[in-house]
Amino acid sequence: MELKVSTRSHAGCALVAITGEIDLYTAPHLQSEFTRLLQDGPSRVVIDMSAVDFCDSTGMNVLLSALKRMKEQGGALEVAAPRPAVRKILQVTGLDSVFTVHEEVPQELLVAEGS
């Protein structure tokens, strides 16, 4: 399955929408997107996972790596709208206490996106 990543930035915040499956084969693409994004130095990154069907340990490692880099830059990385399968992985691994997890994409980012 193909992985699609689109990023929209506004006022130091970036909304990263991911579609597809994050696994051993697609994780390098996601990693390179995060590397490129973090060079721009956003203070907050929210990952919209509402269209992610599957995420394995490789994908979780990519997210953890991005979180670590964001914290080093004094920023925040948050996960939004994970589907039940992804939410379960976050809970089983304990990563739901490492990431800030939102039930849906924060409204202020949707408002910023429309302006």
Image (tube, grey):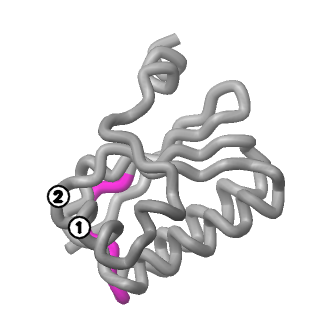
Q: How many marks?
A: 2
Disc 1 + disc 2, Cβ < 8 Å: yes
For this view, does 66 lie left or right of residue 17?
right
Task: Quote the CA–CA distance across marks 1 and 2.
Answer: 6 Å
Disc 2 residue crowd, few under 14, some 14–19, many 20+, Cα 10 Å: few
**Measured from the top left, where is residue 44 in percent x and y?**
66, 42
**Measured from the top left, where is residue 1 in percent x and y?**
20, 74
* 9 inside magenta stretch: no
Q: Is residue 99 above or below residue 107?
A: below
Give the number of the disc on residue 88.
1
Q: Amino acid at mark 2?
A: Pro
Give the number of the disc on residue 61.
none
Q: Main secondary structure of the magenta part?
A: strand
Q: Which residue is mark 2?
A: 84
Disc 1 residue crowd, few under 14, some 14–19, many 20+, Cα 10 Å: some
Q: Is residue 40 above or below residue 13?
A: below
Helix, strand or loop for disc 1:
helix
The quadrant holding residue 14 is: top right
**Measured from the top left, where is residue 104 in percent x and y?**
32, 36
**Measured from the top left, where is residue 106 in percent x and y?**
44, 29
The residue shown at (29%, 56%) is 19
Helix, strand or loop for disc 2:
helix
Q: Amino acid at mark 1?
A: Lys
The residue shown at (59%, 52%) is 77
Q: Residue furthest right?
A: 73
Magenta-drawn segment: 18-24
The residue shown at (39%, 45%) is 80
Q: Is residue 114 above or below residue 81?
A: above
The quadrant holding residue 13 is: top right
